[in-house]
Image: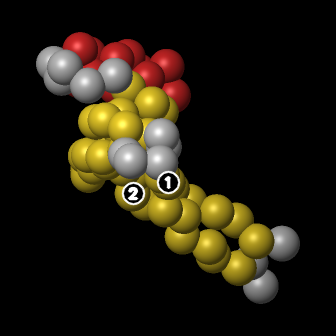
Amino acid sequence: MTNAQKINSQLQLVFVTGIDDEGEEVLQRRSYNNVKPEAENEAVQAVAQVLSELRQDPLHEALRNDQLLLVGNQ
């Protein structure tokens, strides 16, 4: 059986910065590293909301990327 341990987490905020010539949204990503792996999703979402309010561009999506260390039991 394999165990997984969270070792790192990152928050990415994706903003709509405009519309291109073809009518598609232009997106810009902002990444925030060193999110505590044990942080609850609700807390990370609250931080994402506060950070997005500091920008004029609308928030398209907020992503949390977790890095896992896989350790096999023998």
Q: Position of residue 64 (x, y in %)?
A: 47, 43
Q: Quadrant of the C terminus?
A: bottom right
Which residue is identified by label 2? 8
> Considering only vertical position in the picture, is 41 above or below 10?
above
Name the residue rendered at 30%, 46% in the picture.
28
Which residue is most to the right? 1
Name which residue lies at 18% across and 23% down. Answer: 55
SS type, badge 1: strand
Quarter-of-image position of residue 47:
top left
Q: Mark 1 and mark 2 in contact (Cβ < 8 Å)?
A: yes
Image x and y of residue 42, in percent: 49, 19
Element marked by disc 2: strand
Identify the image quadrant of the N terminus.
Answer: bottom right
Mark-to-mark CA distance, 2 and 1 = 6 Å
The image shows residue 48 at horizontal and vertical percentages of: 34, 25
Farthest residue, direction front: 21
- The residue beneath circle 1 is 66
Q: Earlier in the sequence, mark 2 or mark 1?
A: 2
